[in-house]
Image (spheres, rainbow, N blue to C red):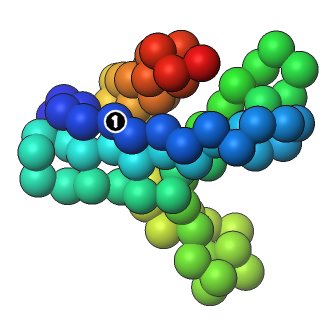
Amino acid sequence: MKVTSTRVRIIGGQGIYAIASVTIDHQLTINDIKVERHGNDITIKMPKTESAKINHQYTIHVNDDRLYKEIKAKILDRIAEIS
C-alpha cells in the first residue's frame, strides 16, 4: 500500500495545526486527519466518530506501522511545500 495523493489545509496555531486527507493506492481516501503541533513535535490523529470518541477508539486505524509513517511523512512533506 502506498500513499498516492495528499491534501492539507493549514489552520495554524497551537493544538490543531492542519487538517489532511490522503489517498492510498488511488482507491481509499481518508479525510479529516488532524495534524497537531505541540512545541516542535507534530503528530497526526486519524478521524474519530462520536461513538468512537466515547469508546476511546479511532474510526480509522492503521495497523501497518510503515504505512502510518508514510502517511505522516507525506502530510509533513505537503505542509513544508505549502508553508
Q: Secondary structure at mark 1?
A: strand
Q: Residue at x 58, y 68 (%)?
A: 48
Quadrant in which the N terminus is drawn: top left
Left or right, residue 76 beside residue 37: left
Find disc 1 in the rendering and name its residue.
6
| Front residue (pair 57, 77) | 77
Q: Residues within 10 Å of mark 1 (few under 14, many from 20)?
A: many
Q: Quadrant of residue 22?
A: top left
Q: Position of residue 61 (x, y in %)?
A: 44, 54
Q: Who's the residue at 65% across and 82% down the image?
A: 50
Q: Residue at x 39, y 40 (%)?
A: 7
Vertical placement of residue 83 versus 6, above or below: above
Task: Residue 40: give x, y in percent of width and height.
Answer: 82, 14
Q: Position of residue 9 (x, y in %)?
A: 54, 43
Q: Is residue 55 visible?
A: no
Residue situated furthest bottom in the rendering: 51
